[in-house]
Image (spheres, rainbow, N blue to C red):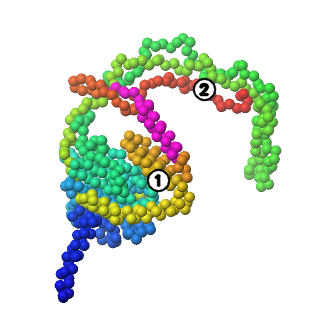
């Protein structure tokens, strides 16, 4: 058989192997719309912004401990911007869309972002080298951490069909950023039934609905009604629930000038009190320094020390009667509070139809024409890798299994070995499970107001494993305090009334509101009363 015949007979085998590989890995081009592995240098394919603010230098570098390359943030305290225009815009409305990428915070992340921006089609005059924070995007997704902020952003920029305005809609109660220095893979799955799921390392951390007002702030579908901006509170509208009793009269025996404290007339000077001894004396062991110049430094004086005679005596110096609380003191008189007969509740404007209200069955998310990274960070060592846009969840899962998981397992074992060498291996397994559970608890929506404090405690515990027990006790106390406040700490509802054209409608609100909503429960003390003096040895 000739060479040509051999090539013909072998061709089907190549096809078979290709089909098998594609099926097993599920990395077929039809499912993988865009994929960037950074195996090759990004120069010429990704465009670095030339805007003046972005001084950070991007590098094509290996992930620490691996042969795998990624896109590296190489300098601290810099702004970075880089963008990759796609050959064709990718629709996020037709079927399932999966957005996935890896980051590794090799030096941790104290303050900075590590998120991607999926840019919508830009103006015809826009150029990649002009990419900056003003470049319009459809979705922003990924880690962000600084101060009280610790979240995996998922932000949709949606166009209001009535107003034509693009509005940012933030996912409520997003998951927290992993606090270690290992590789992590972030996945956002957008479904045709309006569901969006956020995965970290393949584990679902958040599920939401694009059109639910409970899941996005502000909601994509705006409220049907809004407060009337032209409605004004009537001048005679009284919001005070309590008022001073106009019929109350100050009692005749109420002395506003009586001092808060008076001398204790029954006090007697303790026996053995040393009237002629000062509380402090010159240090008998002190001597004038040899280089002391009276003309330049002034007359030298020995430093003072406590008089040792006063240590064994009840006290020294002039004895004075101590002060005690004046039983006749009442402070400034105020009329008692009574229910306000003219109270109408807290006023709010009437509701009118929202001119920007619209309805839709599915979010109208703009297609993705480019992928950009535009961040500011105080840390270097942030590595981006394996950026994927796919139409199939299985494809994204296959990439996680083949590109992310092997690296993660190696890094995890290395971290475990380092912890063992450092003496942290005794409770490391238990600690890992405990901290994983604590992070999940901190992500519970009703604890959102306390999330920064909880995350701060959890992170301190992770950074100092030897203090785990103390940290856990602190966290338990915080949780119990929060639960106690939630169960017992609520305030009484305040009546809120809105003025309408036809009637007055009463409503209730649990909002803690401004100071005018709070009832005065305690009378003020006399601001002119003398403050209580600190006791000394003489005032016994």
For disc 2, the neighbor class at 10 Å (few under 14, some 14 to 19, many from 20) is few
Q: Which residue is mark 2?
A: 530
Magenta residues, as a range?
A: 471-496
Please tell me whether residue 401 belongs to the stretch shown in magenta.
no
Q: Residue at x 42, y 69 (%)?
A: 66
| Residue at x-position 35% and y-position 21% | 343
Q: In the image as oriented, which residue stretches furthest toward the top?
A: 252
Horizontal side of residue 452 vs 1, given as left or right: right
C-alpha separation, residue under disc 1 versus residue under disc 2: 57 Å
Q: Which residue is mark 1?
A: 432
Of the numbered discs 1 and 2, the one sitting upstream in the chain is 1
Asked if 348 appears above or below 47 in the picture, the reply is above
Q: Quadrant of the N terminus?
A: bottom left
- Residue drawn at x 34%, y 26% is 495
| Residue 487 screen position, x and y as percent | 42, 32
Residue 395 position in % (x across, y down): 27, 61
Give percent across and percent down for residue 345: 33, 25
Residue 354 appears in which quarter of the rendering?
top left
Magenta segment main secondary structure: helix
Point out the residue furthest to the bottom here: 2
Q: Nearer the viewer, mark 1 or mark 2?
A: 1
- The answer to whether one can see residue 83 in this image is no
**Quarter that holds the C terminus:** top right
């Amino acid at each position: 058989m000739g060479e040509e015949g051999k090539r013909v007979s072998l061709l089907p085998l190549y096809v078979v192997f290709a089909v098998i590989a594609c099926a097993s890995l599920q990395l077929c081009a039809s499912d993988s719309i865009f994929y960037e592995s950074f195996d090759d240098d990004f120069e010429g394919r990704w465009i670095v912004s030339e805007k003046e603010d972005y001084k950070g230098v991007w590098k094509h570098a290996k992930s620490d401990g691996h042969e795998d390359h990624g896109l590296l943030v190489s300098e601290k305290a810099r702004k970075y911007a880089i963008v990759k225009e796609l050959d064709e815009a990718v629709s996020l409305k037709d079927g399932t869309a999966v957005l996935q990428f890896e980051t590794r915070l090799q030096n941790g992340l104290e303050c900075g972002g590590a998120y991607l921006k999926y840019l919508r089609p830009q103006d015809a005059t826009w150029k990649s080298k002009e990419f900056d924070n003003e470049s319009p995007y459809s979705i922003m997704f990924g880690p962000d951490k600084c101060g009280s902020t610790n979240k995996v952003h998922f932000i949709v920029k949606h166009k209001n069909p009535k107003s034509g305005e693009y509005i940012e809609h933030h996912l409520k109660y997003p998951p927290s950023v992993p606090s270690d220095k290992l590789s992590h893979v972030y996945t956002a799955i957008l479904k045709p039934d309006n569901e969006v799921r956020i995965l970290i390392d393949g584990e679902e951390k958040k599920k939401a609905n694009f059109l639910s007002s409970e899941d996005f702030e502000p909601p994509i579908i705006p409220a049907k009604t809004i407060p009337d901006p032209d409605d004004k509170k009537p001048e005679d509208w009284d919001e005070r629930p309590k008022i001073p009793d106009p019929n109350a009269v100050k009692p005749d025996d109420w002395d506003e000038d009586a001092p808060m404290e008076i001398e204790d007339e029954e006090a007697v000077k303790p026996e053995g009190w040393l009237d002629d001894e000062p509380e402090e004396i010159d240090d008998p062991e002190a001597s004038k320094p040899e280089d002391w110049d009276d003309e330049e430094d002034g007359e030298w004086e020995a430093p003072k020390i406590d008089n040792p005679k006063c240590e064994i005596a009840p006290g020294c110096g002039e004895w004075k009667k101590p002060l005690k609380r004046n039983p006749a003191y009442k402070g400034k008189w105020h009329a008692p509070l009574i229910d306000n007969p003219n109270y109408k509740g807290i006023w709010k404007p009437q509701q009118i139809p929202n001119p920007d209200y619209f309805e839709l069955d599915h979010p109208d998310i703009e297609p993705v024409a480019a992928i950009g990274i535009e961040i500011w960070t105080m840390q270097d060592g942030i590595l981006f890798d394996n950026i994927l846009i796919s139409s199939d969840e299985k494809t994204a899962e296959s990439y996680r299994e083949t590109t992310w998981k092997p690296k993660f397992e190696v890094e995890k074992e290395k971290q475990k070995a380092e912890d063992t060498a450092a003496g942290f291996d005794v409770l490391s397994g238990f600690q890992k499970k405990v901290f994983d559970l604590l992070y999940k608890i901190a992500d519970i929506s009703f604890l959102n107001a306390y999330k920064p404090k909880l995350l701060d405690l959890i992170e301190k515990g992770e950074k100092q494993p030897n203090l785990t027990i103390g940290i856990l006790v602190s966290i338990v106390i915080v949780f119990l305090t929060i639960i106690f406040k939630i169960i017992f700490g609520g305030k009484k509802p305040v009546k809120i009334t809105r003025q309408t054209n036809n009637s007055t409608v009463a409503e209730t609100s649990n909002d803690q509101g401004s100071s005018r909503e709070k009832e005065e429960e305690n009378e003020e003390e006399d601001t002119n009363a003398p403050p209580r003096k600190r006791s000394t040895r003489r005032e016994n």
